[in-house]
Image (cartoon, helix red, strand yellow):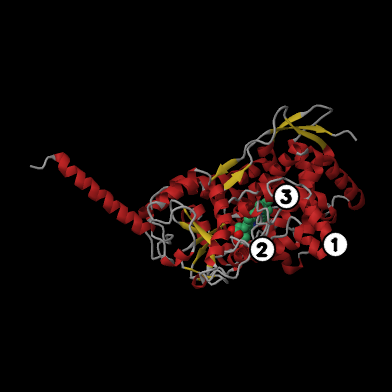
Amino acid sequence: MLDESTFGVPFLTGFLILVSILVAWYRRADPLLDAVPTIGFSDPILSYLSAFRYNFGNGALVLKEGYEKVYIVSLILISLPELRVVRFQNKPGLFKIATFRRWIVVPSGSELIEEVMKAPDSTLSVREPLQDFLQTKYTLSFLNMDDTYHRSVARSKLTRNIAATFDHVHDELVGALRDCIPTTGQEWVKVSILPTMRRIVCRASSRVLVGAPLCRDHDYQTLVMSFMANLIKSAFMISCFPKFLKPCAPSPVPHFYSTDPHIYTRIVARFICRVPTHVRQTMEFIRPIVEERSAKMKEFGDDWDDAPNDMLMWLMSEAKGVERSLEGWARRLLMLNFASVHSTSLTFTQTLYRLLAHPEYLEPLRQEVEAVVAEEGWTKTGMDKMHKIDSFVRETQRIDGPIIFGLNRLALAPFTFSNGVTIPAGTLFGLPVHSVHTDDELYPDAQEFDGFRFLKLREKEGDDVLAARHQTVTTSAELLGFGLGRHSCPGRFLAANEVKALLAHILVTYNVKFEEGKGIPRELRIASFRAPRNANILFRKRQR
Ligand code: HEM
């Protein structure tokens, strides 16, 4: 007779086999991806162990291993012409890694990185990975992601007006420093650096985004600063809901993102997500400005000579259809704040930490600032002449940049690299940013911080055009802090000027140091990103 235990064992075994088959089926890689070497296990089930190592072990190490191994693998594959990975001499090829959710293909070597970053959106899309990360269908369902006119406005008007807006940015930085770091006499003042820098940067960036006096409004700043945290928190919580709660119309790409949110998830999103409240509050803040400007636009048309020179004004001039509304402008401003405030203030904080950890740079940098300001004043031209400061900021971005692995793109159609390898539609790409930045072949002693690394490269060039390749705002496949290609950061000119001007000002205005016995705090790692932790920094007014 069969008792319960003899029935239970085969039942359990059968169940496990069934689950394994389902997992293996779900996890199977497209056969086209077989040409791409795997770091870790390729087997659908064992690949979960690799995913575990990537997520909970040292992900950066997995990527570094891939980045370095791919070179050797490619050398072996060169003897197999049918795999057509022959043409690349230096760190050629691709590798793939397993994450819990999916395979990610990683291009390494400048040539392949450029091919990914310069591919048209119709083939390799930046939008889908962003939608997935921010769960935009639910968190920002009000935002028409197909219309990205705020990005083109940032790319054209913001960049073109960098010199014209520099005075304003500088005024706000100086005012904000005075307000947020109230030094008197010879006392050292303790400053909680991350929130302070966030507020200072928020005020300066907001001057370019919405103008004065709104940029100085404490409540507006608080609203803008909390938007990012709320958006990411909401997106994370929504992403925890299983896919079957988000049934969808057929996706353009097999097995990938949903396109039509299920009503249930919409309701959940409504309760979890505070973004609509942010939009409403932002609308109230900008309402009087928009009304005043709209009246003047009507009155003067194109002849409004002293029209304000800020992002809100540019958006008001460029918006079409539903975007031409108070709500439309509030949304776009929030998105630009999302892209700008935290990234810039974190970059600045890292730069300051590096400076305090390497005090030997204090004097040379200070001398450069004083010499340039004596000649050019606090101007955009002056900022361009601060080559030491620029090199210091770029080196910080190289070694401490927030993206370890990212700049994701999703293949909407099969994509063939110039080495002949074809990657199927539905493949997600990610760039090994930190591995590139710490590649000894690209940067000798890459793990070492050398604040004047890019200054020396610049001086070697001897020609202004070539020298410009080494400045902070220049993007390349070897330095990806501001991305590369068609989606490279359009705000980088503003961000670089803010970080440099802030550093320059602090150098000539204050003595600065870590608290006694403290140094750079251990960085915070969240998935493929990292950020500096907060620290108290001591400031004292400099005596001249
Ligand atoms: C240090 C500060 C900043 C860093 C490190 C940074 C970094 C980046 C990176 C890496 C990308 C490319 C993303 C990709 O290709 O997937 C990007 C895109 C973007 N950034 Fe920045 N950014 C900074 C400041 C700013 C500022 C100040 C603004 C605007 C005022 C801005 C607006 C944007 C926009 C609109 C995009 C999207 C461009 C597109 O998709 O065409 N960023 N940023």
Q: Mark yes or no: residue 488 visible.
A: yes
Number of residues whose C-alpha sits closer than 10 Å to that of mark 3, classed few (under 14), some (14–19) or many (20 or more): many
The amino acid type of the residue labelled 3 equals Glu
Q: Which mark is residue 462?
A: 1
Q: Quadrant of residue 190?
A: top right
Q: Is residue 130 above or below residue 421?
A: above
| Corner quadrant of residue 244 | bottom left
What separation in Å lies between label 3 and label 2 (alpha carbons)?
29 Å
Asked whether residue 105 appears in the rendered view, the answer is: no
What residue is shown with label 3?
395
Q: Residue furthest right?
A: 375
Q: CA distance from mark 1 to mark 2?
A: 35 Å
Residue farthest left in this picture: 1
What residue is at 66 percent from the left and 45 percent from the top? 346
Pointer 2 local density, CA inside 10 Å: few below 14, some 14–19, many at least 20: some
Task: Return the residue nearer the eye: 118 or 77.
Answer: 77
Sequence order check: which comes first, mark 3 or mark 2? 2
Q: Is mark 3 within 8 Å of ligand 1?
A: no
For residue 153, the mark is 2
Q: Is mark 2 within 8 Å of ligand 1?
A: no
Q: Are marks 3 and 2 in contact (CB under 8 Å)?
A: no
Ligand number 1: quarter of image: bottom right
Look at discs 1 and 2 and give the one toward the viewer. Answer: 1
Compared across the picture, whether 39 is left or right of 446 comes to left
Tell me the amino acid under the disc marked 2: Val
Labelled disc at residue 291: none
Q: Quadrant of the C terminus?
A: top right
* Relative to 247, residue 450 above or below: above
